[in-house]
Amino acid sequence: MTNFVDRFTLNFIADGRWHYIANGLLVTLQITFFAVLLGITLGFVIAIIRSTHDNTGKMKIGNAICNIYITVIRGTPVVVQLMIIYYVVFASFDINKVIVAILAFGMNSGAYVAEIFRSGIMSIDRGQFEAGRSLGFNYRQTMMYIIMPQAFKNILPALGNEFIVLLKETSVSGYIAMQDLTKGGDIIRSRTYDAFMPLIAVAIIYLIMVMIFSKLVSMLERRLRNSDH
């Protein structure tokens, strides 16, 4: 017990090392939150373009661009995309690393969210489009008022899972020397030469966050199901 207390004090109390964890957690949450917003926005726009092409044959150029984007993003590792954006795209700019990470993870997430949204839209029966027309809705109104609300309920579990995956993917932010949660734990390890406590602490914090977000998604799913009755 004494040894545990000594190691805990060395890793987290001495020299205020717990700040590395706390500050890193704030950075991780900040990146995740804004990357999710960017990913959902990009994914929604891309899904609309691709599903419109699938349903009407229009927007061929937009669909081709979206296909290239999805292929490139899903075919390359997110850590490579992060490094390209920071060390290549913004090499000549003095830009905040948090913004770079938000752009990288948001663009990466957008490709996956786009396919999630598109699968949700395409899962809706074609009769729903005909029902929209019988009500006097045009294509845009049918998508907004009839298709998307149903699609959103269908894809919510997948969207929640994508959010959790994105949260964990931010752990590679240290590749551009940014102090996120994982990097904070690694800094403590490099100072104390004790890998167990700081890295286990980081793992536990990620686990707790994932459990909290999973619970919130489950609660939202139940609410949406109850609203159907």
Image: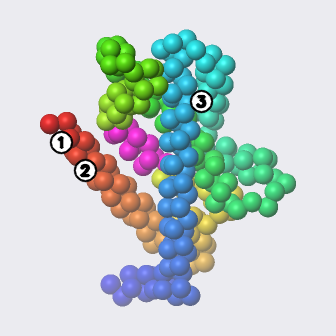
Left or right of 165? Residue 219 is left
Q: In the rendered view, tell whether residue 158 sits above or below residue 99.
A: above
Label 2 to label 3: alpha-carbon separation:
31 Å
Q: Which mark is residue 219?
A: 2
Magenta segment includes 158: yes
Q: Secondary structure at mark 1?
A: helix
Please provide the residue range marked out in magenta: 156-166
Q: In the rendered view, tell whether residue 215 sits above or below residue 69.
A: below
Left or right of 218? Residue 39 is right
Which sits in the foreground, 164 or 174?
Answer: 164
Q: Which residue is mark 3?
A: 70
Report which quarter residue 154 is drawn in: top left
Q: Is residue 175 visible?
A: no
Label 1 to label 3: alpha-carbon separation:
35 Å
Q: Which mark is residue 226?
A: 1
Q: In the rendered view, tell whether residue 179 sits above or below residue 154.
A: below
Rendered residue at 48%/53% (across/down): 167
Q: In the rendered view, tell whether residue 8 sits above or below residue 228.
A: below
